[in-house]
Image (cartoon, rainbow, N blue to C red):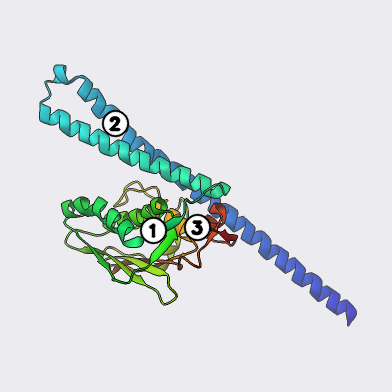
Amino acid sequence: MGEYAALLADAVLRQRAREAEHAARTETELASKVKSEFIANMSHELRTPLNTVIGFSKLISEYEKRQLSGGQIVEYANLIHDAATHLLAVINDILDISKMQSGRYTLDAREIELSEVLNASLAGFRRQATDLGLSLEGQFASDVPTVRGDPDKLRQVFNNLISNAIKFTPPGESVRVIAKALDDGGASVSVRDTGVGMTEEEVRLSLTPFAQVDASHSRWREGAGLGLPIAKALVQLHGGRLQVHSAKTLGTEVTVKLPSRFQVSVTRGRDALLGSGGNGAL
């Protein structure tokens, strides 16, 4: 009987070792695939705006030879500005992810009015939404509480969420930002759109750093695949949670829940990015 038990235990251990080896191999292959896609997409994301900057700045420098009008020069300058702004945003996202992965990301925490942060974010996107034929609305309950956090980082969170909602919502549809108080004294902010929506697998990918729902260069909207993972990590750094609910053709709702300012804790940057523990006082 003892010999049989020993053989059975040995078989179980071998099976577990094989399963662990398979899981490790799968994880390595996935990491390699994500890294390869990231490098390819980064090449595209960086080269496209750089080519715009180089090309149109060259045209402006030759304005006399090309007999450019004042209107054309202004148009080219605006294209250069937009391309450079996009390039800076991509670089900032990469630097943020790098800091989080190294655990060197810090917050400048203070008590802030959440409605002020949300209004600032909404103001920055109203013209873009109007130009795209979208309705962008803010609905804030009167009892939205004061929260404790870094106003710049929270605005970055909501900027990313609103930007994503606008990107994937067709003309004639709507994006709404809804803020309310939670029963525990915290606050909830939801960004809802009536856009293209995602499957469960696409939601999972959207929350993975460097992964993209559509990694092809012909995808409907450009992006480095960093906005939502950064937003989630920043929310976790504030001791909160970010949840995504979506369905194909029905739109997406991303909800941020922030704790009461009397109960805030914060995770280290790397742990927040990886979705693990590591709490400390803010």
- Most foreground residue, 178 or 197: 178
> How far apart in space, not on screen, are marks 3 and 2 (Cα)?
35 Å
As drawn, the label of residue 53 is 2
Above or below, 213 against 42 in this view is: below
Q: Quadrant of the N terminus?
A: bottom right
In the displayed structure, would residue 216 be above or below residue 58?
A: below
Front disc: 1 or 3: 1
Residue type of the residue flagged with mark 2: Val
On residue 233, the disc is none
Distance (Cα) linking label 2 and label 1:
38 Å
Answer with the quarter of the image where residue 181 lies. bottom left
Residue at which label 1 appears: 112
Look at mark 3 in the image and give the residue it sits on: 237
Q: Quadrant of residue 162?
A: bottom left
Q: Nearer the viewer, residue 57 or 157?
A: 157
Would residue 180 be visible to someone looking at this image?
yes
Question: Residue pushed farthest right?
Answer: 2
Q: Residues within 10 Å of mark 1 (few under 14, many from 20)?
A: some
Between residue 31 and residue 194, name the one nearer to us: 194
Q: Earlier in the sequence, mark 3 or mark 2?
A: 2
Report the residue that reaches farthest toward the top: 65
Residue 29 placed where, x, y %? Answer: 56, 53
In terms of image quadrants, where is residue 10? Answer: bottom right
| Callout 3 touching callout 2 (CB < 8 Å) | no
